[in-house]
Structure formats: structure tokens, C-alpha cells
Amino acid sequence: MAPFVTCLRCRECAREYPVEPLNVCDFCFGPLETAYDYEAIARATSRRRIANGPLTIWRYRDLLPVDAENAIDIHAGFTPLIKANNLGRVLGLDNLYLKNDSVNPSFSFKDRVVSVAATKALEFGFDTLSCASTGNLACAVGAHAARAGMRSVVFMPADLEAGKIIGAAIYGSTLVAVQGGYDEVNRLCSEIADSYRWAFVNINMRPFYAEGSKTLGLEVAEQLGWRFPDHAIVPVASGALLSKIWKGFNEMVSVGLMEGPVPTRMHAAQARGCSPVVDAFNAGEEMVMPVRPNSVAKSLAIGNPADGIYAIRAMTSSGGGAHGVHEEEVAQGMKLLAETEGIFTETAGGVVISALKGLTERGAIGRDELTVAYITGNGLKTQEVVGDVVHPLAIRPNMREFEEALHGLSPSAR
Amino acid sequence: MANQRVKFTFPAALVPQPIIYNLGQRFNLVTNIRRADVREEMGWVILELEGDDQEIRQGVAWVKSVGVRVDPISGDVIEG
Ligand SMILES: Cc1ncc(COP(=O)(O)O)c(C=O)c1O
Ligand SMILES: [Zn+2]
């Protein structure tokens, strides 16, 4: 039971449906979203109630569509928000923060969404948790299914980074490596989702699952001392994360936790090898033209984003922007973040840091403005991309060789 | 009888062509459009195809072969 959820509602035609494992409107085939009784939430919730809650996403239970008493909880969320003075100095930003979500239990923000989806799946009585993923989602599904005592079946394209394959398999998931491109994985999984009674977190669980991303908005506002940032830089794949952070900010106003209107400008970050949302936004279009992904940022390489249009609407109504980074800037961004702030992020984080740089250089972000860059995944999963940082001083074990090697280094590295 | 829900995305050059009409005629399918946004530069149509299983498959393959992108109605199922 989720006391404040009233129904599922179609995002396109507003038709209402009962709270069931459904994600598509039968009438217009539009996506369904959970609807809440905000007045009831406003009466129940408060800053104090939240502050006294657990140090996880479940402190925001009043705005989540599941029964939090039975949450599948491996401590997703309440990750560090860090003032980034060193990186800020490099970029010319005096008020820069990093939301370091790479330290979640399975090392990406996907633990937030899957924690909610797994909880709902058990409520509905499913015994199998499933997804199709380029990595992070599969890791989160494996981890939460293990905790919930559910079976998990995860579908992945056969050509992924080793860190992500092992990161999913370790939890005992059944891993299905699908040969062929993303198109094939998509087609096959749609078919399987239609024929098996499984909880596919981002298909029949999607209306509940996606709500978990709101906590990345709620949490940042709380950690800033109940304040909204002026800018949020968000990595975009399906577009759910960006649109739900925006929804989370606005719900805080709807339930009286914050005063509106929300001032935050929402900015999308993608790599040029797969940037359908950024390209549509920069062309002044709401219609996202699907692309064939070819990017090192595999976690963002989604060619036909399910929530692309909603991400664009959030960017437009917030007065935000979009930046597509060159493929070689992905690894550069990862290195810059690691060298300045000691945070090792995956490719998605590299995209965010380089997009932040690009937006700042374009004048989209002012020096004094309160800016939050979302770092959503961990670098240990995509080590391949930055293998070129390794050039050890190879010596025999004596002082002379060590000193010679040290003097051979450039002055800055000594 | 079977049915399949699909999203067709048309590049500019194909926007004026009666592809959905031809699909219905050539493969004996009922095409039931639920939502669409068609402009000069591109267009998408979300529809349901109803007919013989084999003919749906052949019809979708034909639509692809003329240059239309065919996707699941809710966008990519695969995620990051
Ligand atoms: C690390 C990381 N960041 C960001 C995203 C983007 O999330 P969304 O699909 O909600 O846009 C993903 C996955 O999709 C991801 O794995
Ligand atoms: Zn509808």
C-alpha cells in the first residue's frame, strides 16, 4: 500500500488507470505515470519528518509510490553532495557542487529507481525481476533481487565493459548476453516482456521505477539546506532522470516543503555519439529523432529515449540548456574530475563534467550561480576508457633507479 | 489473428508517401493509428497493426526496407 498514490495517469491523454503493473495507456498508447494526492502529502510530510528519516532514499517515502515499510533497501541514496572548489577554480565557477551518486551500493544512481521497482514488484507478487541494460541497471537489478530473494534475469548486449558484466553477474543473476545490436535486444525484450509474467523494472514497473529518480532532486535540495540550485547538469539516456529531478523539485513546492517557483535551470548532457535529446533541444524541437548509438558513453547510448520529450519539456520550461560533448571529451572529463576532486566516475560522469565545462564556456552558467553537477556512475566500471593514464615508473628495487626515474618525470609530476 | 503496437518514424523524404495505406493493402493488415506528429521535416506515428502473424512480420520488414524506422511504442526498452 502506498497511501498517497491515487491512480496511474496517462501523460498524454490524462486517462486514469488502477495501480497495477501497467505502463501504457490502452487508448492512446502514451506512457503512464503515478498520480498522488498532494494535499494529503502536504498534511503528512514536513522537513522535520524527512530529516528524522533513514539516511537513504526512504526518507522521502511520502513522495514514493510504494509501501516503504516493506522496502527492498540496500541503502540506496543519501550520497554525498560535495562543494567542488578545485574543479570550480579550473572552470571559473565559485559555487559548484557535485552530487556523488557513484557511491551507491551497486555503484550508480540506478539503485534508487530499482529499489522502488523491486519493492513494488514484491507488492504485486512477482518472483522475477528483469531488465534490458547496457550495464548499470543490470547491476542494480541483480543487487536488489538478491536482497529481495527474487530471481533476476538481465539482458545485455554482448559487447559490454567487463566491469558491468561482472558487476551484474556477481549477484547470481541469470545474464543473457544478446548478440547483435541494441535493436535486437529491444525487440527481443519487448517480446519477452509480453509473454512472461516477470517484473521488468523499466517496462511494466516503469511508472513506479521512474519515480525513484525524483529522490536525486529532493535530496540535493535538502542537502543544500532546503534550497534549490540555480543550475542542474544531468546526464541523459532515456531522459527519465532529468525529467524526474525536475518533477521532484516541483513536488517539493506542491507539498509545501519549499516555496516556488522552482528557479533551477535543467541542462542535459550527452555525448555526440548518441545525443538525440541534446540535438532536438538545440534545434528547437520537441520531437526527438531516434539515432543509432555509437558512443564510448555506453550508459547514455540510448538511441530512442522513452522520456526524451519529457526531458525536453523540463529543459524548456526551466529555461535550461543542452550540451553534446565530443567523444574524446568523455575521458577528459573523467580525468579532470578525478584529478581535481578525487572522484573516479564512469563515462556518464565524464560527459557531465565536459558538458559543464562547455556550458560554462558558452556563458550559460554564471560564476556565482549555485550549480549542481550530477555524477551518477562509478569509474571502476568503465576502466577501459581511461587505461592510458597508467604509465608506472618501472624500476629495480634500489634508490638510484628510483631517483633517476623520479628526475625523469616532468616537473609538475615530480 | 495477432496484433503489434509499433512506432514508425519517417524521414522527410517519406513523409508525403502513403506508406501506412500501402502497408494495410499489401499485407492485409488493419492499421489503427493512436497518436501521431507529422511535420515537413519528419514525422512519427504510433499505431496498432492487426492481422495474420506472418503478414505483420513481413509488413514491418517491408516498412523498414523503404526507410522507415520501426521501434517499440514506448521507446527503447534497453537502458543504461
Ligand atoms: C550512470 C548513468 N547516468 C545517467 C543515466 C541516464 O538515466 P536516464 O535513462 O534516466 O536518462 C544512466 C542510465 O540510463 C546511467 O547509467
Ligand atoms: Zn492516453
Image (cartoon, rainbow, N blue to C red):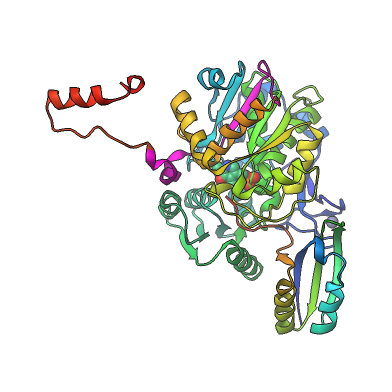
- In the image, A244 versus A350, the foreground residue is A350
- Residue drawn at x 63%, y 26% is A372
Question: Residue A41: where, in percent of width, then height?
Answer: 77, 33
Res A211 seen here: yes
From the top left corner, tell me how far across and down residue B10 is, in percent.
Answer: 79, 63
Q: Which residues are magenta?
A: A364-388
Q: Pick the residue in front: A31 or A116.
A: A31
Vertical comparison of A217 with A190: above or below? above
**Res B45 visible:** no
Viewer-proximal residue among A357 and A127: A357
Question: How many numbered markers are drawn?
Answer: 0
Q: Is A382 contained in the magenta span?
A: yes
Magenta stretch contains residue B60: no
* Residue B26 screen position, x and y as percent: 81, 83
Q: Position of residue A371 (x, y in %)?
A: 65, 24
Q: Is residue A317 above or below residue A403?
A: below
Ligand 1 appears in which quadrant? top right
Q: Please determine whether, in this image, residue A338 is positioned above or below residue A119.
A: above
Placement of the C terminus of chain A among the 4 image quadrants: top left
Q: Residue at x 53, y 53 (%)?
A: A134
Q: Is A336 situated left or right of B66 in this image? A: left
Which residue appears at 75% of the width and 51% of the height? Answer: A288
Side (left or right) of A148 relative to A304 = left
Question: In the rendered image, which quarter is residue A262 located in?
Answer: top right
**In the figure, residue B59 lies in which quadrant?**
bottom right
